[in-house]
Amino acid sequence: MGLLIKNAEFFDGADENAKTGHVLVEGDRISAVLDREPAGYTGETLDAAGLTLSPGFIDTHSHNDFYGVLPNAQKYLRPFVEQGITTQVAGNCGFSTVGIDPATPHGKDLFAFFAPNPDYQQVSAFAGWTAAIDRYSPVNMACLCGHGTIRTSLRGLGPGALTPAELDTMERSIEGELEAGAAGISFGLMYDPGMYGSPEELLRLAKLAARHNKPITFHARALSRFSTSYPELFGRAHNLRALDEVLEIAEKSGAKTHLSHVIFVGRNTWNTLDETVSLIDGANKRGLDLSFDIYPFDFGASTITVALPAWYRGLPPKKKQEFPVRLRLRAEIFATRKLLGFGFNDIQISYAGAARPEYTGRRISEIARAKRTGEFDTYIGIIDETGAETTVIMYSYMNDRIIDLLSRHPRTAYMTDAWITDEGMQNPAAFGAFPKFLRLSREGKAEALGRMIRKMTGQAAGRFGLKDRGRIAPGYYADLVLFDRDAIAETGGESPPAGLSHVIINGEFAVRDGVYLGKSPGRALPVA
């Protein structure tokens, strides 16, 4: 028996041209792509007339490695499957489940912002993580090894250079995960403790990835014209300096390099778009292998402390309370906001802990008005009273021109950078990022459909070494999506998208006739 998808208009993930024909699935793989319906076929048939068939979408930037290992993974991953995502590349921004020393005394720090997992010792090595994903996850998942995770496991979130012995331990740990199947190494240079990594430390790990022919990914040190990552407020834009740093590591190491969420935080940053693209193009012309990912929204999810400077984050709690320290911090944030074109009205609380549910969904400026306190004091007060464990949605990341231009770039990948939380406000990207890209394409506001699907599927699979994924071709795994190209769209809020009827993962229906089936056909994807 098998499944015959007949009368399909399809994009095969290899080029941008639409084709017509019949796709035969046997077990978990595509067995044939046919011009004619096979005579005498007696298996299950799905008539795809009026629908578009595509390889399953590959989300190249996810944090769901923390959620896919949980027995209730369905709760967290269902929205991604419902928008047509069949594979996610997780472990981004320097944070991953894999690579943790099971005996670390810093376990609480490792799970500060993602799903609490008291059994993390069971999934901290790639083999244990693979077993849990295979058991629970409805979506396929590859996982990067996070530099920040390894560093936290060694010595917590604090600053300071690693000792030579710690560096050796870090390299051995990451190499073991790469050999076991980790897809590459991720860096989060804007987050604790990734921001404290020395140039020598970062380059050493980048060279390690290059030896294994696996990519390095970067949440760069700054994503805005002005930031608290650099002391100078004038001169070269901070996001361009941060890109210079990444390009230098890429050039010195020879590693394939991927820029995470190329965004432009603050309205005064938007005019750095053209130089950013020029730097990316120039790097590739010089022989570097550089790509990047984007989402289709003007906002993104982050932590409330992401705007704080490294010098402040590294201070002991009591020191942070001192008047001169707060005065300096206030001055830096005030100057940065004015120069950046980004204010406290652009920061929306998505979750501030059980003690402050009334903050959920509210802008910091709105909370300040209600409390009759200054916006800076409100911002720091929320950090202090929630132990910095507050997540936010931050706006003014993009505009329509940026999304349009970047979506058409030949080195673009598409992603969600979203996760489902147990409480609080959910990120709309978890429910509709890929359908929104497809809607924008239909409306001529983004990449043409055939090229977009190729980037979402075959090109993304190749970038991260996902073998036999992302194509409609004999021998490839049957990860497939069927949608109405004239109706596909995000619906907003926490609802499934419109116009998407079927999702097949490893030959098994995960969504059928628009109904989520609650199965777990996903698999961990080790990368050789």
Image (cartoon, grey):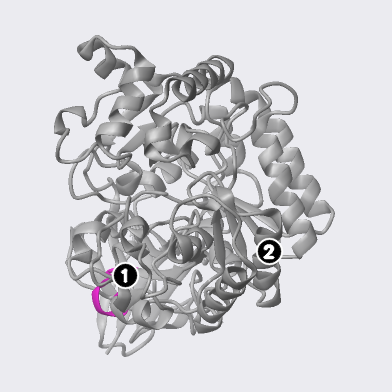
Sooner in the amino-acid sequence: mark 2 or mark 1: 2
Residue 429: quarter of image: top left
Q: Residues within 10 Å of mark 1 (few under 14, many from 20)?
A: many
Numbered circle sitting on residue 256: 2
Does residue 22 belong to the magenta stretch? no
At a point 29% along the width and 40% down the height, the residue shown is 387
Q: Is residue 141 above or below residue 377?
A: below
At a point 62% along the width and 27% down the height, the residue shown is 225
Q: Amino acid at mark 2?
A: Lys
Task: Report the residue marked by disc 1.
Answer: 504
The one of 96 and 465 positioned closer to us in this rendering: 96
Relative placement, left or right, of 30 versus 202 is left
Relative placement, left or right, of 244 versus 186 is right
Q: Amino acid at mark 1?
A: Ile
**Mark 2 element type:** loop
Which quadrant of the rendered structure holds the C terminus? bottom right
- Residue 9 position, x and y percent, is 44, 61
